[in-house]
Image (tube, rainbow, N blue to C red):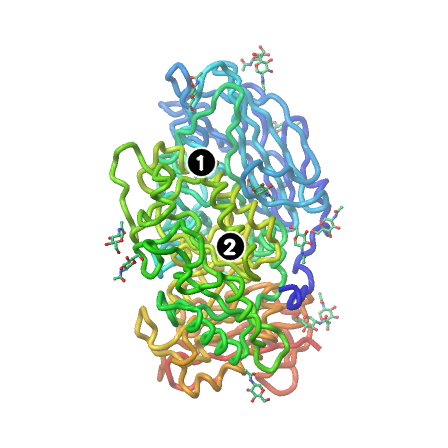
Amino acid sequence: MSALRTVLAGASIVGGALAASSAITANGQNFTLTGASSSYLFHVDQASGDLISDHFGGPATDFVNPPSISQSGWVAGIGDERREFPDVGRGDFRLPAIHISHADGDTVTQLIYKSHEISDGKPSLTGLPATYGNASDVSTLTVHLYDNYSSVAAALSYSIFPQYNAIARSFSITNNGTANISIERASSFSLDLPNLDLNMLELQGDWSHEANRVIRPVQYGETGFRSTVGYSSHIHNPFFALMSPSTTESTGEAWGFHLIYTGSFAATTERFSQGFVRVLLGLNPLHASIPVAPGQTFQSPEAVAVYSSEGLGGMSRSYHDLYKNHLSRSNHTFESRPVLLNSWEGLGFNINQSSLDQLAKETADLGIRLFVNDDGWFGNTPYARINDTAGLGDWTPNVNHFPNGLGPYVGDVNAFDTANTTESLMFGIWVEPEMVNPNSTLYHEHPEWAMHAGAHTRTLVRNQLVLNLALPEVQDYIIGAISNVINSANISYIKWDNNRGIHEMPTPATDYAYMLGMYRVMDNLTSTYPNILWEGCASGGGRFDPGVLHYMSQSWTSDNTDAANRLVIQMGTSIAYPPSAMACHVSAVPNGLTMRNISIEYRAHVALMCGSFGFELNPVDLSAEERAAIPGILDLWEQINAIVITGSFYRLRLPDDSNWPAVQFISANATTALVFAFQQQAMIKPAPPPLRMQGLNATGMYTSNAYNGSYSGATLMNAGLNPVFQIEDYQSQVIWLYRQ
Ligand SMILES: *[C@@H]1O[C@H](CO)[C@@H](O)[C@H](O)[C@H]1NC(C)=O
Ligand SMILES: *[C@@H]1O[C@H](CO)[C@@H](O)[C@H](O)[C@H]1NC(C)=O
Ligand SMILES: *[C@@H]1O[C@H](CO)[C@@H](O)[C@H](O)[C@H]1NC(C)=O
Ligand SMILES: *[C@@H]1O[C@H](CO)[C@@H](O)[C@H](O)[C@H]1NC(C)=O
Ligand SMILES: *[C@@H]1O[C@H](CO)[C@@H](O)[C@H](O)[C@H]1NC(C)=O
Ligand SMILES: *[C@@H]1O[C@H](CO)[C@@H](O)[C@H](O)[C@H]1NC(C)=O
Ligand SMILES: *[C@@H]1O[C@H](CO)[C@@H](O)[C@H](O)[C@H]1NC(C)=O
Ligand SMILES: *[C@@H]1O[C@H](CO)[C@@H](O)[C@H](O)[C@H]1NC(C)=O
Ligand SMILES: *[C@@H]1O[C@H](CO)[C@@H](O)[C@H](O)[C@H]1NC(C)=O
Ligand SMILES: *[C@@H]1O[C@H](CO)[C@@H](O)[C@H](O)[C@H]1NC(C)=O
Ligand SMILES: *[C@@H]1O[C@H](CO)[C@@H](O)[C@H](O)[C@H]1NC(C)=O
Ligand SMILES: *[C@@H]1O[C@H](CO)[C@@H](O)[C@H](O)[C@H]1NC(C)=O
């Protein structure tokens, strides 16, 4: 892998331009967090000791009076306050951020300000993925709260990354009493916004149908969604944006809220009688009830809020830059990722060393750099993984397929040189470490390691069960088994799949404990083997979440590789995640899921807008025309991968709003822009709207492959270009702009 390693030019926004250390001020107990173009204000109510929200939005420097609200009726006092960290049982009738069941059976909590401290940088979160940064990137305010009546301490942490207008929040609860307590609800981010008109945008879907934008008004009562799948899931992503009704892609206010967590979650807004909008994002209460013993501390996951006055696109770019620079720990984040070919859609389970060697040779002959061996390589009689009823959990190569083990086979693969180069073909492999088939040696030796609730039926999905990663012995088994695979052969890439949800947990709190265990395993393996390119996957985008992205630089975006559907899925995913983190492949036509026939150029242009590009097909199924197109596609990849990975991303037009969707990247040095322009359906009328760029230098002059001479940035942004498409379905163009 190291021969290939080309470290690309740095991040598009370099930390440090805005001193983080002056970003937090405390005036008495009035706290101001100042971003480049945002402010977050809250204070301690001197009479009650409660924390009160003042402002989260564009720049503001003063604490102003709250709106006057009639104090008659049942809701008064704390029930009409805008609260920072709402607890429960004292007259605030809205949903709380923290709900604790105390030893005596009551659930009243009174967390009162005790002290605070401000520090440079950001402490890590024990056992959980989180954003990170040094003193010039981020500073942290920690507010300590205490409940005298139930002996519970809370530490509420705010870390501001001023450059990105981003605030990371988490909290811990320490049981300072003498009996167990139980955490029933825990919202990592909580905030009370004033009575504003807001819409909520979420990314909703299912298997092969991920990341569809759903927008609904924030009404009185609760507006929200949750995952109870045990994982973040395809059903809902752990992200939402709030927007003014007039907000567009490029104008207006947008607030993003994003949970850095892979387990079940709940995302809620609650508009109450006074019109205030409570924001809550954290654990799903159905998968909480987390016991905290005397002297012990519960740590919540982290959530990151971003404010933008430049529309949804501005919010997205803040997340993209923050996650590339301060969430992903992978060595590969800013590196070009090798073009790959995955065996699954080509061979399925029908593999052996010679069929794989043949496919690897064809891969190399096409000029591709990385060959990926998908499912079917492991397990032995009677549990050989020759179909999906057996073998998961037994991470030893199938001796019938690989009589000499993986090492010599991978040696064969490495012996092929990628066409017209002296670079040897690299090898990657598929694993699904958190799963077990009852038909496996592992299950027969350790039936107690599979997730189960007493004597309840262990419900199978895809013939498999989930291992209980809350158990340290299961974590150690996986670390050992996967390390053995890696140590046995020259492996450059690993696809880490996960193909079912969690049912029948021993306790609701097992989901959180599982996540701590899973993160321990991922942390161990990715830090022991940092040079492996790790890709997260869960039946497609079922765990496309910031938790996995902390450890792995990329995730498989969807099992749906139909270019028409994929464009919608990728555009949706880009609302919260950088294109550099998406893995996207060209597969054969007619597409196996949708039966659509789309040209290889269009399929490639859709997949090339992602950081990790590849093919998922058997080269023998390619037509002569398709085969002839591949060298050109690989050349294009070579030219664009750097700007896709390090550039800033703009959604110019969305596939669900327009027949002519388009996206744009601008290089980190702001001199080069790349536009992918698409026409979905052939149309006689109307004419395509002008394609107007964004983010260019208005007075700069740009040359292009799309016109002669040079045009100003102002012309390109305001008048726009008129790309000529043939009257045919699924036409696409790649347009370069170079500033002179
Ligand atoms: C902090 O990190 C930035 C990159 O984000 C780097 O440029 C800078 O040198 C670092 N500063 C210190 C003091 O480590
Ligand atoms: C803190 O803000 C409140 C209004 O929320 C204001 O009454 C008070 O004077 C401020 N205190 C300081 C020290 O600025
Ligand atoms: C909590 O107890 C401490 C120490 O006994 C006392 O100083 C403080 O006033 C108490 N706070 C409340 C809100 O009762
Ligand atoms: C825990 O309680 C003891 C007394 O019971 C007190 O001294 C200590 O300050 C408390 N801890 C916290 C974090 O408040
Ligand atoms: C607290 O709960 C644990 C199980 O989570 C149990 O083992 C322990 O006995 C309990 N302790 C007390 C003081 O109730
Ligand atoms: C990859 O990251 C590890 C730390 O996680 C570091 O020690 C190593 O030098 C890095 N390798 C490269 C090639 O950047
Ligand atoms: C390899 O080079 C030959 C001759 O230049 C060319 O025809 C062929 O397309 C190249 N193959 C690939 C995969 O780039
Ligand atoms: C499926 O795999 C199992 C375990 O290797 C094997 O016993 C069984 O014959 C296979 N079934 C079919 C239909 O091939
Ligand atoms: C175990 O394998 C046998 C043989 O393929 C199959 O009939 C059976 O359904 C499998 N059991 C499970 C739980 O998948
Ligand atoms: C990974 O886990 C193994 C087994 O528990 C341990 O020996 C090793 O030190 C761990 N490595 C890292 C980097 O955490
Ligand atoms: C700017 O970045 C582009 C794309 O990464 C690169 O091709 C170009 O050479 C760079 N220009 C300068 C002046 O650094
Ligand atoms: C914009 O382009 C003009 C004209 O080429 C140049 O003088 C100016 O420095 C550029 N601005 C930025 C921010 O790059």
Is residue 397 shown above or below 138? below
Residue placed most toward the observer, 362 or 399: 399
Is residue 14 shown above or below 345? above
Label placed on residue 471? 1
The spot of residue 557 in percent (x, y) is: 44, 60
Residue placed most toward the observer, 392 or 60: 392
Residue 313 seen anywhere in this rendered image of the structure? no
**Who comes first in sequence, dot 2 or dot 1?**
1
Using the rendered view, name the quadrant where residue 674 is placed.
bottom right
The spot of residue 569 in percent (x, y) is: 41, 63
Query: Can you say which quadrant of the picture contains the C terminus?
Result: bottom right
Amino acid type at image mark 2: Val
Residue placed most toward the observer, 163 or 689: 163
Residue located at (53% from left, 70% from top): 413
Residue 486 seen anywhere in this rendered image of the structure? yes
Residue located at (54% from left, 32% from top): 171
- The 10 Å Cα crowd at callout 2, few under 14, some 14 to 19, many 20 or more, is some
Work out how far the residue at label 2 is from the one at label 1, CA to CA, in angstroms: 22 Å
Task: Please indicate whether residue 15 sits to the left or right of residue 628 in the image.
Answer: right
The spot of residue 58 in percent (x, y) is: 59, 47
Residue located at (66% from left, 59% from top): 11
Is there a contact, CB below 8 Å, between mark 2 and mark 1? no
Task: Give SS at disc 2.
Answer: helix
Task: Give SS at disc 1.
Answer: loop
Query: Can you say which quadrant of the picture contains the N terminus?
Result: bottom right
Label placed on residue 598? none
Amino acid type at image mark 1: Leu
Is residue 1 shown above or below 43? below
Residue placed most toward the observer, 61 or 199: 199
Is residue 728 shown above or below 156? below
Foreground: disc 2 or disc 1: 2
Label placed on residue 485? 2
